[in-house]
């Protein structure tokens, strides 16, 4: 299986972000990764591809997503102006659709008929199942058994969309193990199957591809904020699990040195307790799922189980580009505990009439913190990455609302 | 400098036979029992041993080795058990290597890990998820410590890729017989023979075939064209079914014997 290489694409360039990224995978997958990198480079250079994707976003996703000026919420954030980039209003309810539609088009271009995906909260699984239905692809979604329970609604959604959901019962039974199982499937079925990875982690070219498809969030938001306020925001905030919504909104601001980029990781019960998923704040450099980045691991190099009230952030790794942005000081990463996130969750519900995803609530808790630090003259842009319909059960349990 | 493994392959080549390589994760089911299992494998006719580093996220392994790794980790197996079992195996007289996912090696420190493998008499390390592009550090340390660098190639590897990867290999080239994870299969895929032929066209280093081999007949078939036959899950399955008491160890030895006989009758 020789991959057709195009001019300008060099398979020797293996996607490093400083010391991070790269490829730590069985040789069996190299040909498929090369093929994918190749398809991506060709697509990026092809105006037809962009036209098709833009059209899909306009007529199917509902892009561009709007900006909401959260005036009542801002009172709790030190009076700072809080602008919400409403990715929750996308079809399927989160930013995940941006990447999924892009990769589904690549799948079609590679002539593959089957996609597999991992999912934590179920948002990426739902988006993948949706794209599979739209493009007539077979779809299998791997989901940790623990997550199938706390996100039962999304499991049903995926099934309604025609996908097969495979509960993963190994290891911690969460997102990490779902990725392991998806990788095993891919090694076995790589000739017919595209692994539609949902975040900016994994081996090259995934961190680059997913970022390129999520950049649209930041590209739109940057212009929208300029149009609305006449200047750039003081800080851009996002929650970080694997980090796809965060890189999507950060990336177009990287050259704008005056704009602080701040990612909020899942601090669980507190980083000091060990029960958290704050990989950059509480982890160290290592290798997981095909890439080198910050990882939660013990002295034997074993991955440590992560903990978060949010299934979508419950992952012991993080995208390699975030690790790099952290090390060079361009972005900062802070932990937010379950309790802080749930307080912000409730606050947005009651002050703005928006029920956010619990993942996103971590960024909102961050906005309360940063707003109070920067004061009322500051403008904060927050990626409202997903809506909270899927989290009603978890939130009801947390707040003691009988169902 | 030649390793014990290099010498073994040189010797088997002169005898016109393939060798039998057995795999066991360190600390499985316990470290004490693992030592006895290794002994039984060698007594039955296993020529060389791979000591597996039990890792929390073994994406190349099927359910059998996953379960064994998990059990070993739960019983406290880590880097010290890997080095200790390696030494035990070498002391029993079998050229031995470590097989490990890259994460634990990098965590421990590539330089320290390589040094410990050499110090405990190991011949090298099999690195199933390390690409040669990420190997600069390992290459330096392997040379410093006179260790074999054993990479795994697959049926999907392009000819160009095969040439590059096998050029980096020493000791032997690990040919994955099929596209998939470890575990016994009812038949060894025809891909294996084709892959070995493709490797022969770019390299004259020894080639061992792994993934899916569990019976004497399969071992015999593979030994007609490969220089080594790797068996892992089949041994582990015996332990999972029969334990590692007298009965289990007897069955381990019997399997090693029948695999070894299959190999010897191949040419």
Image (tube, coloured by chain):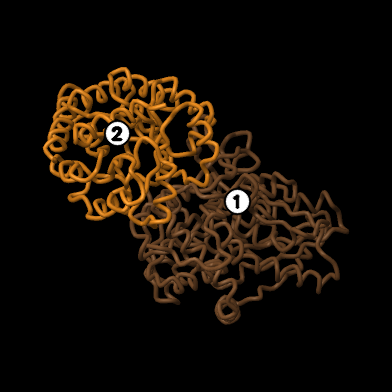
Give the left or right position of residue A346, taking residue A286 as reference. right
> What residue appears at the point 65 percent right and 65 percent down from the top-left corner?
A215
How far across and down, in percent of the image, does residue A359 sit?
A: 60, 55
User: What letter labels the chain drawn in orange?
Assistant: B
Q: Which mark is residue A16?
A: 1
Q: Mark 1, chain letter?
A: A
Figure check: B208 above or below A198: above
In the rendering, which numbered label is found on residue B173? none
Please give the chain letter of the residue carrying mark 2.
B
Q: Judging from the image, what secondary structure is the residue with disc 1 in?
A: strand
User: Which residue is nearer to you in this view: A177 or A209?
Assistant: A209
Q: Compared to B1, does A15 lie above or below?
A: below
Instruction: Identify the residue at the far right of this view.
Output: A377
The quadrant the N terminus of chain A occupies is: bottom left
Label 2: state its secondary structure.
strand
Left or right side of A383 for B19? left
Residue A110, given in percent of the width and then of the height, sits at 44, 70
- Residue A51: give x, y in percent of width and height: 59, 81
Res. A4 in view: yes
Q: For the point 28% across and 32% down, which residue is it?
A: B9
CA–CA distance in space, label 1 to label 2: 33 Å
Q: Quadrant of residue A136?
A: bottom left
Is the same chain shared between marks 1 and 2?
Answer: no
Residue in the foreground of this view, choosing between A389 and A305: A305
Left or right: residue B236 compared with residue A364 = left
Q: Would residue A93 be seen by someone viewing this image from the given angle?
A: no
Chain identifier of the brown chain: A
| Res. B23 mark | 2
Which of the two residues, B199 or B123, is positioned nearer the viewer here? B199
Viewer-closest of A113 and A384: A113
């Amino acid at each position: 299986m020789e991959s057709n290489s195009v001019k300008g694409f060099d398979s020797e360039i293996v996607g490093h972000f400083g010391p991070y990224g790269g490829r730590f995978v069985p040789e069996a997958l190299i040909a498929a990764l090369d093929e994918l990198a190749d398809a991506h480079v060709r697509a990026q250079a092809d105006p037809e591809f962009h036209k098709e994707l833009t059209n899909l976003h306009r007529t199917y996703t509902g892009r561009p997503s709007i900006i909401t000026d959260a005036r009542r919420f801002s009172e709790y954030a030190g009076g700072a102006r809080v602008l919400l980039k409403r990715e929750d209003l996308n079809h399927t309810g989160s930013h995940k659709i941006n990447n999924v539609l892009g990769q589904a088009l690549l799948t079609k271009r590679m002539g593959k008929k089957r996609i597999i995906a991992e999912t934590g909260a179920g948002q990426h699984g739902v988006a993948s199942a949706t794209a599979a239905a739209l493009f007539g692809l077979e779809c299998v979604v791997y989901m940790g058994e623990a997550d199938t329970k706390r996100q039962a609604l999304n499991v049903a959604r995926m099934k309604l969309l025609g996908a097969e959901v495979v509960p993963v019962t190994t290891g911690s039974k969460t997102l990490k193990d779902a990725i392991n199982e998806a990788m095993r499937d891919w090694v076995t079925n790589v000739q017919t199957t595209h692994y539609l990875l949902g975040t900016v982690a994994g081996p090259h070219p995934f961190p680059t591809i997913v970022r390129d498809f999520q950049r649209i969030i930041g590209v739109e938001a940057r212009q929208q904020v300029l149009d609305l306020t006449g200047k750039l925001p003081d800080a851009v905030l996002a929650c970080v699990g694997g980090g796809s919504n965060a890189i999507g909104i950060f990336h177009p601001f990287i050259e704008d040195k005056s704009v602080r980029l701040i990612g909020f990781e899942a601090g669980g019960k507190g980083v000091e307790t060990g029960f958290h998923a704050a990989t950059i704040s509480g982890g160290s450099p290592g290798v997981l799922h095909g890439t080198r980045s910050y990882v939660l691991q013990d002295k034997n190099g074993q991955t440590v189980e992560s903990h978060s009230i949010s299934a979508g952030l419950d992952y012991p790794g993080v995208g390699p580009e975030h690790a790099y942005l952290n090390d060079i000081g361009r972005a900062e990463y802070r932990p937010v505990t379950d309790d802080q996130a749930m307080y912000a969750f409730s606050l947005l519900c009651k002050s703005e009439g928006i029920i956010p995803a619990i993942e996103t609530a971590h960024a909102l808790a961050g906005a309360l913190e940063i707003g109070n630090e920067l004061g009322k003259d500051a403008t904060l842009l927050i990626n409202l990455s997903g809506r909270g319909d899927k989290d009603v059960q978890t939130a009801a349990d947390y707040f003691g609302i009988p169902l | 400098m030649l390793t014990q493994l290099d010498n073994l392959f040189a010797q088997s080549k002169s005898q016109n036979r393939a060798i039998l390589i057995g795999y066991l994760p360190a600390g499985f089911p316990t470290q004490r029992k693992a030592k006895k299992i290794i002994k039984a494998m060698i007594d039955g006719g296993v020529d060389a041993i791979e000591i597996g580093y039990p890792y929390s996220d073994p994406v190349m392994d099927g359910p059998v080795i996953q379960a064994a790794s998990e059990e070993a980790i739960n019983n406290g197996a880590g880097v010290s058990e890997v080095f200790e079992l390696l030494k035990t195996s070498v002391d029993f007289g079998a050229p031995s290597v470590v097989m490990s996912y890259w994460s634990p090696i990098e965590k421990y420190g590539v330089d320290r890990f390589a040094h410990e493998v050499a110090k405990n008499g190991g011949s090298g390390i099999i690195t199933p998820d390390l690409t040669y592009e990420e190997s600069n550090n390992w290459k330096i340390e392997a040379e410093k410590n006179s260790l074999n660098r054993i990479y795994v190639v697959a049926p999907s590897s392009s000819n160009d890729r095969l040439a590059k990867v096998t050029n980096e290999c020493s000791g032997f080239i690990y040919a994955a017989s099929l596209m998939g994870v470890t575990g016994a299969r009812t038949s060894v895929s025809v891909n294996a023979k084709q892959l070995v032929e493709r490797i022969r066209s770019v390299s004259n280093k020894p080639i061992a075939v792994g993934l899916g081999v569990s019976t004497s007949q399969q071992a015999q078939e593979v030994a007609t064209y490969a220089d080594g036959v790797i068996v892992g899950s089949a041994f582990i399955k015996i332990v999972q079914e029969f334990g590692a008491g007298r009965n289990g160890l007897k069955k381990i030895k019997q399997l090693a014997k029948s695999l070894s006989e299959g190999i010897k009758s191949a040419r």
